[in-house]
Image (cartoon, coloured by chain):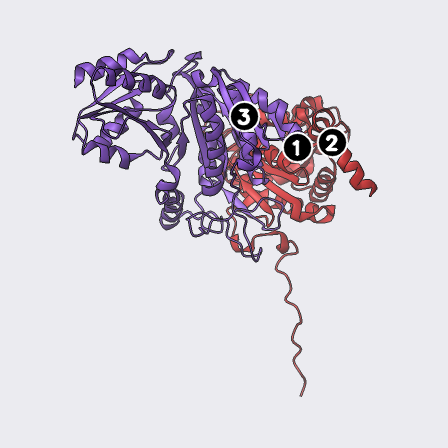
Chain colours: A red, B purple
Amino acid sequence: MQEIPTPSKKQPCHPLDDLIRTDRIPHIWCPGCGIGTVFSACLTALKVSGINLRKTVMVSGIGCSGRAAGYVKLDSFHTTHGRAIPFATGLKLANPELNIVVFSGDGDLFAIGGNHFIHAARRNMDMTVICVNNLNYGMTGGQVAATTPHLAKSTTTPVGNPETPFNLPLMAYACGATYVARWTMLHIRDLTDSITEAICKKGFSFIEALSPCPVNYGRRNKQKPLDMLKLYQEKAIIKNDADPSTLDIDFEKGIILGKFVDLDRPTFIEQYDKIYRPSRLQENVSELSS
Amino acid sequence: MKPAVLTGEYFMTGDVACAEGALAAGCRFFGGYPITPATEIAERMAIRLPHVDGCFIQMEDEIAAMATILGASWGGVKSMTATSGPGFSLMMENIGLGICTETPCVVVNVQRGGPSTGLPTHGAQSDMMQARWGSHGDYEIIAMAPSSPQEIFYLTITAFNLSEKYRLPVLIMTDEIIGHMSEKVIIPEAKLIKTVSRPKPKGRKDHFKPFAPGPNGVAPMPAAGEGYNLHITGLTHDEKGYPVMAVETQAEMMTRITEKIQRNLDDIIRTDSFLLDDAEIVVVSYGISARTSMAAVAEARKLGIKAGLLRLVTIWPFPEEQIRTLADRVKGFVTVEINLGQIHREVERCAGGKVPVFLVGHPGGTIIHPDSVVNILKEAF
């Protein structure tokens, strides 16, 4: 009689399971939402980066993207609306060994939290900030954001947005970020590579990940669920080192993607140690030489 | 490296003594924002923290300052900020995050006249109710009011110890007068200063519950980077730290964060007294106004009025039991404070209508003169 083989190992449900709090699944993200794709790009990047994950922390603010901190199986903090960056600043300064990834949305990071983004970039605080930009406030039901295109409709701009949106990479560059990139969630491999690079680079790194919100943004702007993805495919222009002032998002002319800034300058902690705690620097040198 | 405890005798302002108390308590992180009359605390910490391997950062606003000290606390370091009225208002949301996530830290409010920009350079005690209820939702808080630079040194240490023990933000509610007043401050030897640090978890890390209360109602607290895969959120959460949007979880969490204070009142509440044992009229006061009150009680005694002083050192949780007990045997109370009657209402509530309660209040900007207290003691009783 032929023996029925018993598998020695259960196949993991998902290759990133070891970085996910599977006991918190299903997640809250809607069908057609792109946040999960950006999140998995981030988890893959964390894995391939080779950094010590035990010393890696994810910090989020409030909103759909802010829920990422609740699903990652790392030390993770889901803070108040807009305050992920200053909370993360405290973590980093208390323990400079920690690798910090801030994962949040455009409303959280650039409207209510805009001031903190500006200053963390200026200080070159050593952290990676990933902004999922879905062009609106999704969790509260589709209100206008600081990133909503001019004339686009939302529940609070029912006839069209009278305002002009931010050019996020330009803002990051102008404020002093040492790494700036933009991809869409459709450019998953480029996005993952970019996040990996940013995580491994010291200093303030910023990645904008464009992501569809068919339920709240698409629905009000005559876009079917796949329409935004088609725009990402058809209108994407990959142009590394593009001048940041040319990066306004224009869905008709084209969306410029790529890595725009990659430079080096001392981080806040390096400067603080040099000027205020030289004894700490000497200790580090003696540790390295021993 | 220089010593954290500057043992010796000094002529020091309350603000500087507060900073020295923090360092003696083990504070190694300060996130601040300049504001009169609390700036000198930040300035002292900016000089001193790097000497003791700590870190000072001036943030972009008080919202960020409060957020950084919470982050630093989860980074494993005792942390602090200091502000005054307008900044205290901005900190309120993140003070709530600290309460909800049971994060130890100390917030100093050097009170000035309000509302709004108010009287930046003049003292008041008008944020006392904001200290109790300023952040949204129900909660318990610990707030303490020092009456001298010497006392602010010691109370800052106490504030850190209580915050570490009970895992919550502890408030020092001082005022411009104490903050800017120079007096003798004695800093004892380091070995004589008792400091408390948050209990650390033991045992397996994989199923650790960061909000499962220990024997005194408080959970042990690891830091980020120690391998616990913590999840910490300001959403209503279970003992694991996971958000659960359920009536039962809300009740469990609220019970946890309120009972750890309510069940330990004897350990938390501190009061002081002057000629209280045989007093028939009790002056209830705190902070700088307690010094006014002390002078007034001494003067009243000379006039044959049997007055005594109950000085509140812990304001929140409110020393209800002490006032209730006194209400059974005295003829009345007089509350003395630089506001329009915030703690006065608490005294009235606890007196429960048994005896009259009078207020000697002032809208802010100056100290209360002892004569105005003596006059009430003479006229009202």
| Circle 3: element type | helix
| Circle 1: element type | loop
Q: Is residue B33 visible?
A: no
Q: Mark 3, chain letter?
A: B
- The circle on residue A151 is none
Indicate the amino acid at tag 3: Ala
Q: Are marks 3 and 1 on the same chain?
A: yes
Q: Residues within 10 Å of mark 2 (few under 14, many from 20)?
A: some
The residue tagged 1 is: B53
Q: Mark 1, chain letter?
A: B
- Name the one closer to the observer, B129 or B148: B148
- List x then y, in percent, for residue A286: 80, 38
Q: Is residue A88 visible?
A: yes
- Name the one closer to the observer, B156 or B6: B6
Compute the Cα span from label 3 to label 1: 15 Å
- List x then y, in percent, for residue B134: 39, 29
Q: Is residue B277 left or right of residue A19?
A: left
Q: Are marks 1 and 2 on the same chain?
A: no
Q: Residues within 10 Å of mark 1 (few under 14, many from 20)?
A: some
- List x then y, in percent, for residue A247: 69, 26
Indicate the amino acid at tag 1: Asp
- The circle on residue A279 is 2
User: Of label 3 and label 1, which has the lower sequence position?
Assistant: 3
Q: Is residue B155 above or below residue A196?
A: above
- List x then y, in percent, for residue B67: 53, 32
- The circle on residue B19 is 3
